[in-house]
Image (spheres, grey):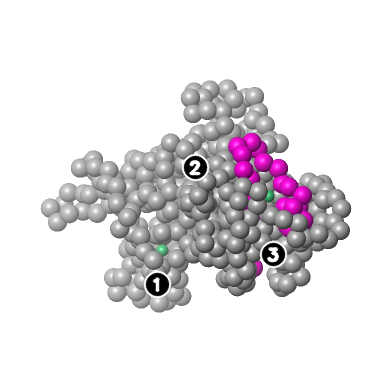
Amino acid sequence: MPTLQKTAICSNSKYAFGLTKFKNMKTSAEVSLHIPPKMWSEFRDSMLKSRMFNEEVIGFFFCQRHQVFKNKIRYIPKTWVVPSSDCYEHQSMNGLVLKQHFHSYLLENHLQEGLDVIHIHTHAGQDIPDFSCIDDRYESEYARFLTSDFPKKPRLISGVFDEDLQSCQFRIWDRKGKKFESVKLCHSLFHISENREIMDNTDLMFARQQIFGEANQKQLNQLKVALIGCGGIGSIFAELLGRLGVKNWVLIDPDKLETVNLNRMPGATQEMVEQQWHKVHYVKHLIKRIYREGSCVKTIPTSIESELAKPEIATCDLIVVATDNHLSRKTAQELALKYMRPLVCLGTHIDVKPDKTPRMYCRVTVPPLGGGWCLMCGNIINLQLAALESAPSDIHQMAAGAGYLEGVNDPAVFWLNSICASTGVGVIHGMVSGFLNVDSGIDWIYEFPGSDWRKTNTKYFRTDDCYFCS
Ligand SMILES: [Zn+2]
Ligand SMILES: [Zn+2]
C-alpha cells in the first residue's frame, strides 16, 4: 500500500468557524463497518510503525457502501492508506498535521472512484477514546468539503482509537457535516445484530454445540448464505449447515429435480420429480424441515448470471458455489470480489484410470477475501471453458461434440459429495468461530481411495496482475 504525504487532522484550532453543537442523528439505519481480519492487522501494524512513541497517527480506508436492507448499511473497505512518518508536518501526543501533498494524493487517487472515506486516528492513552471538539470541527468541515467538491458526494466515517489501536468509537457524518450517527466496527466478515434474540427452543436444539460458544451459535443463526447450485453437493451442504444453525438462505439454481439426481440428494423423492420441483424449492424444503419457524429462505430458480440473482447475493454474508460448470463459478467469484464477501467453492470429480480403477476427488477452495488470488488466477476454474459455457447453445453443442466440454452426466456419488459438503461446512464453522484461519485462502483436495488430504500451498497462487482480483 502506498504511504505518502499530507493534510491537517486533529490538531490546533485552525477551524474556528462558528459551529455550535453536533447532534447524534436519530438512528435511522444500522451502519456497520467490516474490516477483514487480515486487512485490519496490516493496517494496524502500519499505523503503529508510523510513529516513534505514542504520538497520534492517522490512516484511511476507502469503502464500498452496501445497502443491505432499507435500514441496514454495511461498509466494506476496498483499500487503505497509512501515511509514513515523513508525511507528517507535525506529530505529537496532542495532535497531528499532515503535509499538504498527502491530502491531494488521497483525493486524486482514491476519491475519484466514488468510494466513501474513513479517517482513523489515535489519541494518547489506553482508555476508550472520545472525539475531541477539534475532531468535531475538522470532520464536520471535511464532510461538507466531500459533498461540495465531489460529484458522487462521498460520506465521511471517522474513528478514534486509543494509542494501542484496541478501543474505539466510529461515527458517520451526514453530508452537511451537521450530524453523525454511530457505526459499529466488526473485525469479522460477519455481523451480529443486537436486536435479534435466539429463541429458547433453538437453545436446546444446539445444546450439543455449546462448546463452541454462545456468540458463535448466535452468529451462525444470523448468518445469511447464498448457495449457488442446489444439486448433489449443494443439497447436502444445505442440510449440514442448516443443522449447524444457519437459518437464512438465498438459493440459486435453474434446474428441476430429475430421476437421475435421486442417487445423491437427501430426502428427494420420485414424487418431487413427477411434480417437477425446482431444486431450489426442494432445498428450501430441507431447511424448513429443520426449522419449524424462524428460518428465512429465498428461492431464485434462475442461473447466477440472471439480474434477479445478483442483488440477492449482495445481501448475503457468505457465498457458496457448488455448481458443475465453470461459468457460474467465475460469476460467483466476480460477485464475491465485487461485494467483498467470502466465497467457498465446492466440487467433486470422478474418473477412471486406464487400469479401470476409479479415482475420486473432492475439492474445497476459499480464495482470500482481501485479494491475492482468486479462482481464475489460481486456475481453479478454466476461463476457456467458462467462455464456452457462456456461448449460445449451438456453439456450445458444437464444442461439446468436438470434445472440449466435460459431459453433463459426470459420475457422482452421494458419499463423495458428502465428504466435500461436510468439509465445506467445517471450513465455514471454522471461519465463523475463528478456529480456522482463511486469511491467505485455502485449497484442499481429498483423494480416494488413497485417502489423502492435499493442501495446496496457496503461496504459489499469489499473483500481482490478475485481471479479476488485483
Ligand atoms: Zn482527535
Ligand atoms: Zn485472481
| Residue 286 to residue 395: above or below | above
In space, the residues marked 1 and 3 are separated at their CA atoms by 40 Å
Under circle 2, the secondary element is helix
Q: Do the residues under discs 1 and 2 have CB atoms within 8 angstroms?
A: no
Q: Residue at (52%, 46%) from the top-left corner?
A: 53
Q: Earlier in the sequence, mark 1 or mark 3?
A: 3
Relative side of 118 to 133, left or right: left
State the quadrant of the C terminus: bottom left
In reply to whether residue 138 is colored magenta, the answer given is: yes
Figure check: 279 above or below 238: below
What is the span of residues highlighted in magenta in the rendered image? 114-139
- Horizontally, residue 331 falls left or right of residue 92, namely left
Q: Amino acid at mark 2?
A: Ala
Residue 384: image location, x then y, percent: 36, 71
Q: Which mark is residue 238?
A: 2
Q: Badge 3, how many Cα within 10 Å: few under 14, some, many 20+?
A: many
The residue that disc 1 covers is 388
Q: Is residue 230 visible?
A: no
Q: CA distance from mark 3 to mark 2?
A: 39 Å
* Badge nearest the viewer, 3 or 2: 3
